[in-house]
Amino acid sequence: MFKKVLIANRGEIALRIIRACRELGIHTVAVHSTADASALHVRFADEAVCIGSPPSRESYLHVPALLSAAEITQADAIHPGYGFLSENADFAEICKTCKIHFIGPKPEVIRLMGNKVHAREAAKVSGLPLLPGSSGVIKNIEEAEQLAKQIGFPVILKASAGGGGRGMKIVRAPEALSKALATASAEAVAAFGNGDMYLERYVERPRHIEIQIVADEHGNIVHLGERECSVQRRHQKLIEESPSCALSPKLREKMGEVSVKAMREIGYNSLGTIEYLLDEGGEFYFMEMNTRVQVEHPVTEQVTGVDLVKTQLLMSSGQKLKLTQKDVHFRGAALECRVNAEDAVTFAPSPGKITAYSAPGGPGVRVDTAAYENYTVLPYYDSLLAKLIAYGEDRPTTIARMKRALSEYVIRGVRTNIPFHRAALLEEDFVAGRYDTRFVERMQDSELGIQRLKRAIEEMP
Protein backbone atom coordinates (compact mmCIF):
# COMPACT_ATOMS: atom_id res chain seq x y z
CA MET A 1 0.00 0.00 0.00
CA PHE A 2 1.09 3.56 -0.67
CA LYS A 3 2.59 5.41 2.27
CA LYS A 4 1.84 8.94 1.09
CA VAL A 5 -0.43 10.20 -1.70
CA LEU A 6 -0.25 13.67 -3.21
CA ILE A 7 -3.63 14.86 -4.46
CA ALA A 8 -3.26 16.90 -7.63
CA ASN A 9 -6.66 18.53 -7.34
CA ARG A 10 -8.84 20.78 -5.21
CA GLY A 11 -12.39 21.14 -3.88
CA GLU A 12 -14.73 18.32 -2.97
CA ILE A 13 -12.90 15.59 -4.91
CA ALA A 14 -9.66 16.37 -3.08
CA LEU A 15 -11.54 16.02 0.22
CA ARG A 16 -13.13 12.78 -0.98
CA ILE A 17 -9.70 11.30 -1.73
CA ILE A 18 -8.29 12.51 1.62
CA ARG A 19 -11.11 10.72 3.44
CA ALA A 20 -10.52 7.48 1.55
CA CYS A 21 -6.78 7.67 2.24
CA ARG A 22 -7.35 8.32 5.93
CA GLU A 23 -9.52 5.20 6.24
CA LEU A 24 -6.73 3.19 4.61
CA GLY A 25 -4.02 4.70 6.83
CA ILE A 26 -2.36 6.59 3.97
CA HIS A 27 -0.82 10.01 4.64
CA THR A 28 -1.93 12.77 2.28
CA VAL A 29 -0.40 15.84 0.69
CA ALA A 30 -2.63 18.66 -0.54
CA VAL A 31 -1.42 21.08 -3.19
CA HIS A 32 -2.99 24.48 -3.60
CA SER A 33 -2.80 27.78 -5.38
CA THR A 34 -2.29 30.96 -3.37
CA ALA A 35 -6.03 31.64 -3.67
CA ASP A 36 -6.86 28.22 -2.14
CA ALA A 37 -4.67 28.60 0.97
CA SER A 38 -7.70 28.40 3.30
CA ALA A 39 -9.51 25.64 1.40
CA LEU A 40 -10.77 22.60 3.33
CA HIS A 41 -8.62 20.11 1.43
CA VAL A 42 -5.58 22.11 2.60
CA ARG A 43 -6.77 22.03 6.21
CA PHE A 44 -7.60 18.33 6.31
CA ALA A 45 -4.58 16.88 4.53
CA ASP A 46 -1.56 15.80 6.60
CA GLU A 47 0.69 18.16 4.63
CA ALA A 48 0.13 21.01 2.18
CA VAL A 49 2.29 22.65 -0.47
CA CYS A 50 1.59 25.88 -2.33
CA ILE A 51 2.32 25.30 -6.03
CA GLY A 52 1.57 28.64 -7.66
CA SER A 53 -0.77 31.52 -8.40
CA PRO A 54 -4.54 31.15 -8.97
CA PRO A 55 -4.73 30.46 -12.74
CA SER A 56 -4.82 26.69 -13.26
CA ARG A 57 -1.96 26.71 -15.77
CA GLU A 58 0.26 28.23 -13.06
CA SER A 59 -0.76 25.81 -10.31
CA TYR A 60 -3.02 22.75 -10.72
CA LEU A 61 -1.89 22.22 -14.34
CA HIS A 62 1.75 23.10 -13.69
CA VAL A 63 3.47 19.71 -13.93
CA PRO A 64 6.95 20.75 -12.67
CA ALA A 65 5.41 22.29 -9.55
CA LEU A 66 3.34 19.16 -8.86
CA LEU A 67 6.32 16.85 -9.28
CA SER A 68 8.49 19.09 -7.09
CA ALA A 69 5.83 18.98 -4.39
CA ALA A 70 5.74 15.18 -4.60
CA GLU A 71 9.53 14.98 -4.38
CA ILE A 72 9.81 17.41 -1.46
CA THR A 73 7.15 15.58 0.55
CA GLN A 74 8.39 12.14 -0.54
CA ALA A 75 4.97 11.12 -1.85
CA ASP A 76 5.06 7.75 -3.57
CA ALA A 77 1.83 8.25 -5.54
CA ILE A 78 -0.27 11.02 -7.11
CA HIS A 79 -4.06 10.91 -7.33
CA PRO A 80 -5.31 13.29 -10.04
CA GLY A 81 -9.03 13.21 -9.13
CA TYR A 82 -11.11 14.37 -12.10
CA GLY A 83 -10.52 17.31 -14.43
CA PHE A 84 -7.14 19.08 -14.50
CA LEU A 85 -4.48 16.43 -15.34
CA SER A 86 -6.58 13.33 -14.61
CA GLU A 87 -6.72 12.24 -18.27
CA ASN A 88 -3.37 13.62 -19.38
CA ALA A 89 -1.30 10.70 -20.69
CA ASP A 90 1.89 12.78 -20.77
CA PHE A 91 1.55 13.56 -17.06
CA ALA A 92 0.94 9.90 -16.26
CA GLU A 93 4.04 9.00 -18.28
CA ILE A 94 6.18 11.63 -16.54
CA CYS A 95 5.04 10.30 -13.15
CA LYS A 96 6.10 6.82 -14.23
CA THR A 97 9.51 8.10 -15.37
CA CYS A 98 9.96 9.84 -12.01
CA LYS A 99 9.01 6.60 -10.20
CA ILE A 100 5.88 8.16 -8.73
CA HIS A 101 2.78 6.01 -9.06
CA PHE A 102 -0.01 7.64 -11.07
CA ILE A 103 -3.33 6.47 -9.63
CA GLY A 104 -5.14 5.71 -12.84
CA PRO A 105 -4.77 3.55 -15.93
CA LYS A 106 -1.60 3.05 -17.94
CA PRO A 107 -0.46 6.09 -19.97
CA GLU A 108 -0.96 4.28 -23.28
CA VAL A 109 -4.58 3.49 -22.38
CA ILE A 110 -5.26 7.10 -21.35
CA ARG A 111 -3.78 8.24 -24.66
CA LEU A 112 -5.85 5.73 -26.64
CA MET A 113 -9.18 6.56 -25.01
CA GLY A 114 -8.48 10.30 -24.72
CA ASN A 115 -8.47 10.76 -28.48
CA LYS A 116 -12.08 10.33 -29.61
CA VAL A 117 -11.14 9.06 -33.08
CA HIS A 118 -8.71 6.47 -31.73
CA ALA A 119 -11.21 5.55 -29.01
CA ARG A 120 -13.87 4.88 -31.66
CA GLU A 121 -11.46 2.66 -33.54
CA ALA A 122 -10.56 0.76 -30.35
CA ALA A 123 -14.24 0.43 -29.46
CA LYS A 124 -15.03 -0.98 -32.89
CA VAL A 125 -12.22 -3.55 -32.67
CA SER A 126 -13.34 -4.61 -29.19
CA GLY A 127 -16.95 -5.10 -30.26
CA LEU A 128 -18.68 -1.99 -28.91
CA PRO A 129 -21.58 -0.72 -31.07
CA LEU A 130 -20.92 2.58 -32.87
CA LEU A 131 -23.09 5.16 -34.58
CA PRO A 132 -22.43 5.43 -38.33
CA GLY A 133 -19.69 8.00 -38.83
CA SER A 134 -16.21 8.80 -40.08
CA SER A 135 -13.59 6.09 -39.71
CA GLY A 136 -10.98 8.68 -38.77
CA VAL A 137 -10.30 12.41 -38.72
CA ILE A 138 -12.15 14.40 -41.40
CA LYS A 139 -9.56 15.59 -43.91
CA ASN A 140 -11.57 18.34 -45.63
CA ILE A 141 -15.05 19.72 -46.24
CA GLU A 142 -15.50 17.58 -49.36
CA GLU A 143 -15.04 14.40 -47.35
CA ALA A 144 -17.41 15.70 -44.67
CA GLU A 145 -20.08 16.51 -47.24
CA GLN A 146 -19.82 13.10 -48.89
CA LEU A 147 -19.97 11.27 -45.57
CA ALA A 148 -22.90 13.34 -44.30
CA LYS A 149 -24.78 12.57 -47.50
CA GLN A 150 -24.21 8.85 -46.99
CA ILE A 151 -25.24 8.90 -43.32
CA GLY A 152 -28.13 11.34 -43.72
CA PHE A 153 -28.85 14.53 -41.80
CA PRO A 154 -28.79 15.49 -39.00
CA VAL A 155 -25.14 14.77 -38.20
CA ILE A 156 -22.91 15.92 -35.37
CA LEU A 157 -19.33 17.19 -35.59
CA LYS A 158 -17.09 16.39 -32.62
CA ALA A 159 -13.57 17.37 -31.67
CA SER A 160 -11.17 14.43 -31.67
CA ALA A 161 -9.49 15.69 -28.50
CA GLY A 162 -12.66 17.21 -27.07
CA GLY A 163 -15.02 16.92 -24.16
CA GLY A 164 -17.63 18.87 -22.22
CA GLY A 165 -19.48 19.93 -25.37
CA ARG A 166 -16.70 22.14 -26.71
CA GLY A 167 -15.84 21.76 -30.38
CA MET A 168 -19.21 20.12 -31.02
CA LYS A 169 -21.82 21.17 -33.60
CA ILE A 170 -25.11 19.66 -34.74
CA VAL A 171 -25.72 20.10 -38.48
CA ARG A 172 -29.22 19.64 -39.87
CA ALA A 173 -28.75 20.72 -43.49
CA PRO A 174 -26.01 20.38 -46.17
CA GLU A 175 -25.60 24.13 -46.60
CA ALA A 176 -24.71 24.56 -42.90
CA LEU A 177 -21.93 21.95 -42.85
CA SER A 178 -19.01 24.03 -44.09
CA LYS A 179 -19.47 26.85 -41.58
CA ALA A 180 -20.14 24.41 -38.72
CA LEU A 181 -16.96 22.46 -39.48
CA ALA A 182 -14.84 25.62 -39.50
CA THR A 183 -16.42 26.93 -36.27
CA ALA A 184 -16.17 23.62 -34.40
CA SER A 185 -12.55 23.12 -35.48
CA ALA A 186 -11.63 26.65 -34.34
CA GLU A 187 -13.30 26.04 -30.97
CA ALA A 188 -11.39 22.77 -30.61
CA VAL A 189 -8.07 24.49 -31.33
CA ALA A 190 -8.83 27.15 -28.70
CA ALA A 191 -9.96 24.62 -26.08
CA PHE A 192 -7.65 21.66 -26.69
CA GLY A 193 -4.91 22.83 -29.05
CA ASN A 194 -6.14 20.30 -31.62
CA GLY A 195 -8.63 21.10 -34.38
CA ASP A 196 -9.12 17.53 -35.66
CA MET A 197 -12.79 16.65 -36.12
CA TYR A 198 -14.88 13.56 -36.78
CA LEU A 199 -18.51 13.16 -37.77
CA GLU A 200 -21.30 10.76 -36.87
CA ARG A 201 -25.07 10.40 -37.12
CA TYR A 202 -26.96 12.57 -34.65
CA VAL A 203 -29.59 10.93 -32.45
CA GLU A 204 -32.38 13.44 -31.84
CA ARG A 205 -33.67 12.32 -28.42
CA PRO A 206 -31.07 10.06 -26.85
CA ARG A 207 -30.59 9.11 -23.26
CA HIS A 208 -27.07 9.37 -21.84
CA ILE A 209 -26.16 6.14 -20.07
CA GLU A 210 -22.77 5.29 -18.60
CA ILE A 211 -21.39 2.02 -17.26
CA GLN A 212 -18.99 2.02 -14.31
CA ILE A 213 -15.99 -0.27 -14.77
CA VAL A 214 -13.61 -1.47 -12.05
CA ALA A 215 -10.43 -3.23 -13.22
CA ASP A 216 -7.31 -4.25 -11.33
CA GLU A 217 -3.71 -4.84 -12.47
CA HIS A 218 -4.27 -8.61 -12.70
CA GLY A 219 -6.98 -8.79 -15.37
CA ASN A 220 -9.97 -8.90 -13.03
CA ILE A 221 -12.79 -6.66 -14.30
CA VAL A 222 -16.37 -6.08 -13.15
CA HIS A 223 -19.04 -3.51 -13.94
CA LEU A 224 -21.09 -1.76 -11.27
CA GLY A 225 -24.16 -1.06 -13.36
CA GLU A 226 -25.22 2.17 -14.96
CA ARG A 227 -25.81 5.82 -14.22
CA GLU A 228 -28.17 7.97 -16.24
CA CYS A 229 -26.86 11.46 -17.00
CA SER A 230 -29.50 12.75 -19.43
CA VAL A 231 -30.38 15.88 -17.43
CA GLN A 232 -27.74 18.16 -18.87
CA ARG A 233 -27.32 21.59 -20.40
CA ARG A 234 -24.94 22.10 -23.29
CA HIS A 235 -23.48 18.67 -22.57
CA GLN A 236 -22.77 19.59 -18.93
CA LYS A 237 -24.41 17.12 -16.54
CA LEU A 238 -26.71 18.47 -13.83
CA ILE A 239 -28.58 15.47 -12.37
CA GLU A 240 -27.47 11.84 -12.38
CA GLU A 241 -29.23 8.72 -11.12
CA SER A 242 -28.86 4.99 -10.73
CA PRO A 243 -30.48 2.79 -11.82
CA SER A 244 -31.83 4.24 -15.06
CA CYS A 245 -35.56 3.97 -15.73
CA ALA A 246 -34.72 3.25 -19.38
CA LEU A 247 -32.88 -0.03 -18.79
CA SER A 248 -34.46 -3.43 -18.33
CA PRO A 249 -32.45 -6.04 -16.40
CA LYS A 250 -31.68 -7.73 -19.71
CA LEU A 251 -30.38 -4.53 -21.34
CA ARG A 252 -28.36 -3.67 -18.20
CA GLU A 253 -26.72 -7.09 -18.33
CA LYS A 254 -25.97 -6.75 -22.05
CA MET A 255 -24.42 -3.28 -21.70
CA GLY A 256 -22.35 -4.43 -18.73
CA GLU A 257 -21.10 -7.55 -20.49
CA VAL A 258 -20.00 -5.78 -23.69
CA SER A 259 -18.31 -3.07 -21.59
CA VAL A 260 -16.33 -5.59 -19.55
CA LYS A 261 -15.37 -7.50 -22.70
CA ALA A 262 -14.12 -4.31 -24.37
CA MET A 263 -12.05 -3.31 -21.34
CA ARG A 264 -10.49 -6.75 -21.23
CA GLU A 265 -9.58 -6.41 -24.93
CA ILE A 266 -7.73 -3.12 -24.40
CA GLY A 267 -6.11 -4.19 -21.12
CA TYR A 268 -7.79 -1.60 -18.91
CA ASN A 269 -6.56 -1.35 -15.29
CA SER A 270 -8.38 1.20 -13.12
CA LEU A 271 -11.72 2.85 -12.51
CA GLY A 272 -13.29 3.89 -15.79
CA THR A 273 -16.62 4.87 -17.27
CA ILE A 274 -17.90 3.96 -20.73
CA GLU A 275 -20.50 6.43 -21.96
CA TYR A 276 -23.27 5.47 -24.36
CA LEU A 277 -26.15 7.04 -26.22
CA LEU A 278 -29.39 5.06 -25.93
CA ASP A 279 -31.87 5.75 -28.74
CA GLU A 280 -35.65 5.57 -28.61
CA GLY A 281 -35.61 2.03 -29.97
CA GLY A 282 -33.45 0.74 -27.11
CA GLU A 283 -30.24 0.48 -29.15
CA PHE A 284 -27.06 1.76 -27.49
CA TYR A 285 -23.93 3.21 -29.07
CA PHE A 286 -20.45 3.91 -27.71
CA MET A 287 -19.81 7.62 -27.25
CA GLU A 288 -16.56 7.96 -25.27
CA MET A 289 -14.67 6.71 -22.25
CA ASN A 290 -13.51 8.58 -19.16
CA THR A 291 -10.36 7.05 -17.68
CA ARG A 292 -10.80 8.47 -14.18
CA VAL A 293 -13.18 8.70 -11.25
CA GLN A 294 -16.37 10.49 -12.31
CA VAL A 295 -18.01 13.46 -10.61
CA GLU A 296 -21.16 11.36 -10.25
CA HIS A 297 -19.49 8.29 -8.71
CA PRO A 298 -21.44 8.61 -5.40
CA VAL A 299 -24.71 7.35 -6.93
CA THR A 300 -22.99 4.07 -7.82
CA GLU A 301 -21.50 3.86 -4.33
CA GLN A 302 -24.97 4.27 -2.82
CA VAL A 303 -26.68 1.53 -4.85
CA THR A 304 -23.81 -1.00 -4.74
CA GLY A 305 -22.19 -0.30 -1.37
CA VAL A 306 -18.76 -0.21 -3.06
CA ASP A 307 -16.39 2.61 -2.06
CA LEU A 308 -14.99 3.46 -5.48
CA VAL A 309 -12.14 5.71 -4.35
CA LYS A 310 -10.83 3.23 -1.78
CA THR A 311 -11.15 0.46 -4.36
CA GLN A 312 -9.19 2.57 -6.85
CA LEU A 313 -6.41 3.16 -4.33
CA LEU A 314 -6.21 -0.52 -3.41
CA MET A 315 -6.11 -1.66 -7.03
CA SER A 316 -3.49 0.93 -7.99
CA SER A 317 -1.25 -0.31 -5.20
CA GLY A 318 -1.28 -3.74 -6.85
CA GLN A 319 -3.94 -5.50 -4.79
CA LYS A 320 -6.35 -7.86 -6.49
CA LEU A 321 -9.99 -6.91 -6.88
CA LYS A 322 -11.95 -8.81 -4.25
CA LEU A 323 -15.25 -8.38 -6.08
CA THR A 324 -16.53 -10.76 -8.72
CA GLN A 325 -19.51 -9.95 -10.92
CA LYS A 326 -21.67 -12.29 -8.83
CA ASP A 327 -20.82 -10.22 -5.73
CA VAL A 328 -22.27 -7.04 -7.24
CA HIS A 329 -25.83 -6.37 -6.11
CA PHE A 330 -27.96 -3.30 -6.78
CA ARG A 331 -30.19 -2.00 -4.01
CA GLY A 332 -32.57 0.95 -4.03
CA ALA A 333 -32.11 4.13 -6.04
CA ALA A 334 -29.80 7.13 -5.83
CA LEU A 335 -29.90 10.66 -7.25
CA GLU A 336 -27.18 13.31 -7.44
CA CYS A 337 -27.80 17.01 -8.00
CA ARG A 338 -24.75 19.10 -8.85
CA VAL A 339 -25.03 22.30 -6.84
CA ASN A 340 -23.19 25.00 -8.76
CA ALA A 341 -22.46 28.63 -7.95
CA GLU A 342 -24.42 29.95 -10.89
CA ASP A 343 -27.68 31.68 -11.72
CA ALA A 344 -30.59 29.22 -11.75
CA VAL A 345 -32.10 30.81 -14.89
CA THR A 346 -29.15 31.90 -17.03
CA PHE A 347 -26.55 29.46 -15.61
CA ALA A 348 -24.04 32.34 -15.49
CA PRO A 349 -21.26 31.76 -12.90
CA SER A 350 -21.68 33.52 -9.55
CA PRO A 351 -18.34 33.83 -7.74
CA GLY A 352 -18.13 35.58 -4.37
CA LYS A 353 -18.15 34.95 -0.62
CA ILE A 354 -20.64 32.56 0.97
CA THR A 355 -22.15 34.55 3.85
CA ALA A 356 -24.32 31.77 5.29
CA TYR A 357 -24.09 28.01 4.83
CA SER A 358 -26.11 25.09 6.21
CA ALA A 359 -26.06 21.67 4.55
CA PRO A 360 -29.08 19.33 4.66
CA GLY A 361 -29.05 15.99 6.46
CA GLY A 362 -31.36 13.25 7.66
CA PRO A 363 -31.97 9.72 6.39
CA GLY A 364 -30.61 8.93 2.95
CA VAL A 365 -28.87 12.28 2.37
CA ARG A 366 -25.16 12.74 1.58
CA VAL A 367 -23.33 15.99 0.78
CA ASP A 368 -19.90 15.97 -0.85
CA THR A 369 -18.61 19.54 -0.64
CA ALA A 370 -15.69 21.78 0.22
CA ALA A 371 -17.88 24.83 0.86
CA TYR A 372 -18.45 26.49 4.24
CA GLU A 373 -19.56 29.83 5.67
CA ASN A 374 -17.14 32.61 4.60
CA TYR A 375 -15.72 30.37 1.87
CA THR A 376 -14.95 32.35 -1.28
CA VAL A 377 -16.10 30.87 -4.59
CA LEU A 378 -13.22 31.70 -6.89
CA PRO A 379 -13.65 32.79 -10.53
CA TYR A 380 -10.65 30.76 -11.70
CA TYR A 381 -12.14 27.28 -11.35
CA ASP A 382 -15.22 25.18 -11.98
CA SER A 383 -18.41 26.49 -10.34
CA LEU A 384 -19.25 23.18 -8.61
CA LEU A 385 -19.99 23.85 -4.93
CA ALA A 386 -21.38 20.53 -3.80
CA LYS A 387 -22.79 17.20 -4.85
CA LEU A 388 -26.07 16.52 -3.11
CA ILE A 389 -26.90 12.81 -3.09
CA ALA A 390 -30.13 11.20 -1.99
CA TYR A 391 -30.72 7.47 -1.53
CA GLY A 392 -33.84 5.40 -0.83
CA GLU A 393 -35.31 1.93 -1.20
CA ASP A 394 -37.00 3.01 -4.43
CA ARG A 395 -37.04 5.94 -6.85
CA PRO A 396 -40.13 7.75 -5.42
CA THR A 397 -38.58 7.69 -1.93
CA THR A 398 -35.28 8.98 -3.31
CA ILE A 399 -36.97 11.83 -5.18
CA ALA A 400 -38.92 12.79 -2.03
CA ARG A 401 -35.69 12.83 0.00
CA MET A 402 -33.92 14.93 -2.62
CA LYS A 403 -36.79 17.45 -2.61
CA ARG A 404 -36.54 17.66 1.18
CA ALA A 405 -32.77 18.07 1.09
CA LEU A 406 -32.93 20.80 -1.55
CA SER A 407 -35.50 22.71 0.51
CA GLU A 408 -33.16 22.55 3.55
CA TYR A 409 -29.98 23.62 1.77
CA VAL A 410 -28.98 27.18 2.72
CA ILE A 411 -26.26 28.93 0.70
CA ARG A 412 -26.23 32.73 0.78
CA GLY A 413 -23.89 35.32 -0.68
CA VAL A 414 -23.69 33.66 -4.11
CA ARG A 415 -26.39 32.48 -6.46
CA THR A 416 -26.84 28.74 -6.89
CA ASN A 417 -28.77 26.43 -9.19
CA ILE A 418 -30.70 24.87 -6.30
CA PRO A 419 -33.98 26.42 -7.57
CA PHE A 420 -33.39 24.74 -10.94
CA HIS A 421 -33.10 21.35 -9.26
CA ARG A 422 -36.23 21.94 -7.19
CA ALA A 423 -38.17 22.84 -10.32
CA ALA A 424 -36.72 19.95 -12.34
CA LEU A 425 -37.84 17.37 -9.79
CA LEU A 426 -41.44 18.58 -10.23
CA GLU A 427 -41.45 18.00 -14.00
CA GLU A 428 -43.80 15.16 -14.95
CA ASP A 429 -41.33 13.70 -17.46
CA PHE A 430 -38.63 13.46 -14.79
CA VAL A 431 -40.93 11.98 -12.17
CA ALA A 432 -42.14 9.41 -14.71
CA GLY A 433 -38.57 8.66 -15.82
CA ARG A 434 -39.26 9.40 -19.48
CA TYR A 435 -36.73 12.18 -20.06
CA ASP A 436 -33.81 12.50 -22.49
CA THR A 437 -30.87 14.86 -23.14
CA ARG A 438 -33.22 17.64 -24.30
CA PHE A 439 -35.12 17.67 -21.01
CA VAL A 440 -33.61 20.97 -19.79
CA GLU A 441 -34.23 22.65 -23.13
CA ARG A 442 -37.92 21.68 -23.03
CA MET A 443 -38.19 22.71 -19.39
CA GLN A 444 -36.79 26.17 -20.17
CA ASP A 445 -39.20 26.58 -23.09
CA SER A 446 -42.26 25.49 -21.09
CA GLU A 447 -44.46 28.10 -19.46
CA LEU A 448 -45.12 25.73 -16.56
CA GLY A 449 -41.39 25.04 -16.23
CA ILE A 450 -40.64 28.77 -16.08
CA GLN A 451 -43.35 29.28 -13.43
CA ARG A 452 -41.98 26.45 -11.32
CA LEU A 453 -38.48 27.89 -11.52
CA LYS A 454 -39.66 31.36 -10.50
CA ARG A 455 -41.56 29.86 -7.56
CA ALA A 456 -38.52 27.84 -6.51
CA ILE A 457 -36.38 31.00 -6.51
CA GLU A 458 -38.97 32.83 -4.38
CA GLU A 459 -39.11 29.93 -1.89
CA MET A 460 -35.35 29.74 -1.34
CA PRO A 461 -34.59 29.66 2.43
Image (cartoon, helix red, strand yellow):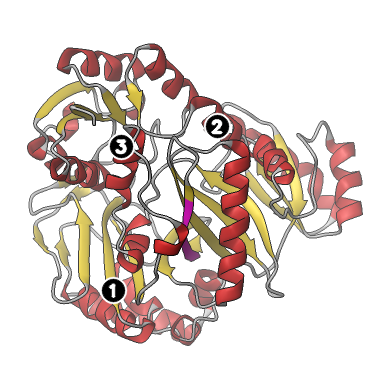
The correct choice, above or below, for 95 with respect to 145 in the image is above
- Judge whether residue 51 can be spotted in this image: yes
Q: Are marks 2 and 1 in contact (CB under 8 Å)?
A: no
- Towards the viewer: 283 or 249: 249
Q: Is residue 70 above or below residue 17?
A: above
- When the figure is inspected, residue 152 is found, relative to residue 18, above or below; the finding is below
Answer yes or no: is residue 247 visible: no
Image quadrant where residue 38 sits: top left
| Residue range (magenta) | 222-230
**If the image is split into quadrants, where does the N terminus sit?**
top left
User: Circle 1 is placed at which residue position?
Assistant: 391
**Callout 2 crowding tier (Cα within 10 Å): few <14, some 14–19, many ≥20:** some
Q: Nearer the viewer, mark 2 or mark 3?
A: 2
Upstream in sequence: badge 2 or badge 1:
2
Residue 228 within the segment the image draws in magenta: yes
Real-space CA distance between mark 2 and mark 3, rounded to the nearest whole angstrom: 30 Å
* Residue 97 occupies quadrant: top left
Q: Secondary structure at mark 1?
A: strand
Identify residue for label 3. 380
Is 366 left or right of 255, judged from the image as shown? Answer: left
